[in-house]
Structures are given as C-alpha cells and as structure tokens.
Amino acid sequence: MTERERAINQDLHVLDEAHRLGRITRAEYRARRRRVLGSLYDSSGVVTARKTLVPGIATTQRARHVHQGPADASAASGRALTTLLTMRPGLPWKPLLAILAGAVLLVFVACWLLRGA
C-alpha cells in the first residue's frame, strides 16, 4: 500500500469516526467521502484499485442502449439479469458431483446390507 493510499485510508477513518459520533451530518459525510475517494482517481480517470469488477459483454451492450422506450422494459430487465449472472462466480460442480455420487453409493451399500440381514 502506498503512502497516498494510507493517507486516504486515514482520512476515511477520521471521517467515519466523525460521522459515527454525530459531529457531521449525513450529507456532509457523503460529500466529504466523495471528495476523499475522488482523490483515488488518476488524471487519466483510471481507478487505482487493484481488484475491480470487469463488466461482461451484457454491460457494455446495455451502455449502448441508454435511450429506451417503455416497451423495452422487459428486454432491459432481461439484460440486467444476464449482467448479474455473468458477474456471479460459477459453482464448483466437480465437488458437488463427487458428494452426490458418494451419497448415492452410500444408499446402495445401506440397501445391500439391510437386504442381506
């Protein structure tokens, strides 16, 4: 973490403490927080955060279709759902498959043992 990031973290900590103790209003807190976080941006407009979300294809396509009529509301909601699903991490299907196979095998063994008794 650079000195600049440490200074910004310290400023945010002080700002949060002041808001928590009621020394500043909510509107003032938000305005000051925006200014502090605005200093994270480079002059080129690139955020210096290391782990940012990369928008999927649906997000970039949605940005092109900003002006929509009310008839496109269902299409917009479908694109929003697609965007959320593309940003969601995938389920680890191999461990789930192994657990399911183990459970099925356990049921077969239990049935076989109970039939033999």
Image (cartoon, rainbow, N blue to C red):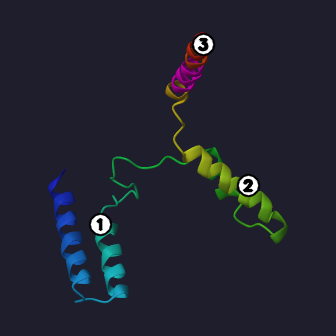
Q: What's drawn in magenta, residue-wise?
A: 97-107
59 sits to left or right of 96: right
Which of marks 1 and 3 precedes in the sequence? 1
Could you say which is closer to the camera, residue 57 or residue 42?
Answer: 57
Residue 28 spot, x, y in % from top left? 33, 86
Residue 86 spot, x, y in % from top left? 60, 44
C-alpha separation, residue under disc 3 versus residue under disc 2? 49 Å
Report the residue marked by disc 1.
39
Q: Is residue 100 magenta?
A: yes
Q: Amino acid at mark 2?
A: Gly
Q: Residues within 10 Å of mark 3 (few under 14, many from 20)?
A: few
Mark 1 element type:
loop
Q: Which one is closest to the eye, mark 3 or mark 2? A: 3
Q: Amino acid at mark 3?
A: Trp
Residue 31 marker: none
The part of the image, by quadrant, that contains residue 117 is top right
